[in-house]
């Protein structure tokens, strides 16, 4: 996790027990074992219990007919509990469920990691139903961790899209914040972008910063990274030092960008001209790492 205090989805201590996935009877056996812990994903949301928290239940006979089951791994503290994701054959809205963004605040680190894994895998299964070589519908295998083509036996692995996100500072240690054209006024973040084939992470940081705001960066240093299953990214966080301060914006990617000093932060949050990213994002964690602690909250209007 690096030097940040916490990174949502990155701090769980789950044993993925990958060696168990090759056992062809594993899911059937786990779904017949009353000690197995099952979580359900219905549509885009995880099924919740009466308290509004993540429902964690024992297996049921109908799980055998689910659209998808995945062995997620085992908890490691004390008694090892095996977790299985079930995507039941129900449509969204038939059962009470919450999206991960709304659920995450109520989850401990282990469960946050489990549900991030579950959502990333479920998103991949949903969007990759066919063989990319021959077009035949594929079947889940290895306890839900791959899909296999019944025609040519090719194996298809879950994809993770690698993105870099960088806290760029100038020689006065001001932080660069930018707003994407689709974001509302006031919503600003540090810059980010996807890594391209044939590119190192450091090169991706330098390219994205130059493309978006016309700034060359010098030292680029890794800080921490975060699984981000919306739908399937890994966000790799860096600091980078700008070699100049004059911003030249690419208006298709950035609607506005500015340097901010620490002393300005409280005022621009209070005035509404800076609305920080969600506290579950590594974007926010990197800003707070630069700031030196939690960002001040916006005071409610009197
Ligand atoms: Zn095929």
Image (tube, rainbow, N blue to C red):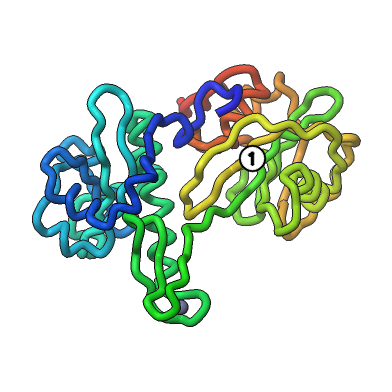
Total numbered circles: 1
User: What residue is at 82 percent from the left and 32 percent from the top?
Assistant: 219
Q: Quadrant of residue 56?
A: top left
User: What residue is at 46 percent from the left and 33 percent from the top?
Assistant: 8
**213 relative to 144, above or below:** above
Left/right of residue 108 with respect to residue 275 in the rendered view? left
**216 relative to 267, above or below:** below
Residue 61 % position (x, y): 9, 56
Mark 1 falls on what kind of element?
loop
Q: Is residue 102 visible?
A: no
Residue 211 % position (x, y): 80, 53
Left/right of residue 222 with respect to residue 94 in the rendered view? right
User: What residue is at 71 percent from the left and 52 percent from the top?
Assistant: 255
Residue 214 % position (x, y): 85, 48
How dense is the environment of label 1, judged by Cα within 10 Å: few (below 14), some, or many (20 and up)? Answer: many
Q: Which residue is mark 1?
A: 189
Foreground pick, 266 / 84: 84
Residue 98 % position (x, y): 30, 47
């Amino acid at each position: 996790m690096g030097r940040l205090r916490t990174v949502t989805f990155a701090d769980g201590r789950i044993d993925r027990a990958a060696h168990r996935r090759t056992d062809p009877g594993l899911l059937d056996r786990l779904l017949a074992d009353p000690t197995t812990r099952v979580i359900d994903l219905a549509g885009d949301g995880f099924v919740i219990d009466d308290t509004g928290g993540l429902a964690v239940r024992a297996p049921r006979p109908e799980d055998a007919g689910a659209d998808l089951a995945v062995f997620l791994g085992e908890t490691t503290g004390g008694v090892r509990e095996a977790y299985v994701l079930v995507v039941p054959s129900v449509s969204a809205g038939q059962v009470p469920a919450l999206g991960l963004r709304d659920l995450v605040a109520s989850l401990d680190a282990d469960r946050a990691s489990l549900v991030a894994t579950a959502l990333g895998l479920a998103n991949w299964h949903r969007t990759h139903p066919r063989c990319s070589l021959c077009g035949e519908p594929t079947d889940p295998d290895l306890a839900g961790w791959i899909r296999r083509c019944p025609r040519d036996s090719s194996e298809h692995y879950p994809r993770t899209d690698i993105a870099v996100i960088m806290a760029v500072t100038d020689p006065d240690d001001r932080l660069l914040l930018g707003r994407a054209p689709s974001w509302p006024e006031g919503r600003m973040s540090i810059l980010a972008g996807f890594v391209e084939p044939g590119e190192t992470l450091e090169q991706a940081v330098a390219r994205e910063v130059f493309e978006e705001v016309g700034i060359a960066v010098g030292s680029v240093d890794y800080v921490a990274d975060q699984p981000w299953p919306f739908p399937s990214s890994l966000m790799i966080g860096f600091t980078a030092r700008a070699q100049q301060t004059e911003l030249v914006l690419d208006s298709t990617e950035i609607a506005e960008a500015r340097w901010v000093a620490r002393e300005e932060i409280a005022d621009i949050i209070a005035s509404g001209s800076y609305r920080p990213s969600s506290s579950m994002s590594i974007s926010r964690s990197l800003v707070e790492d630069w700031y030196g602690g939690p960002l001040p909250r916006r005071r409610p209007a009197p």
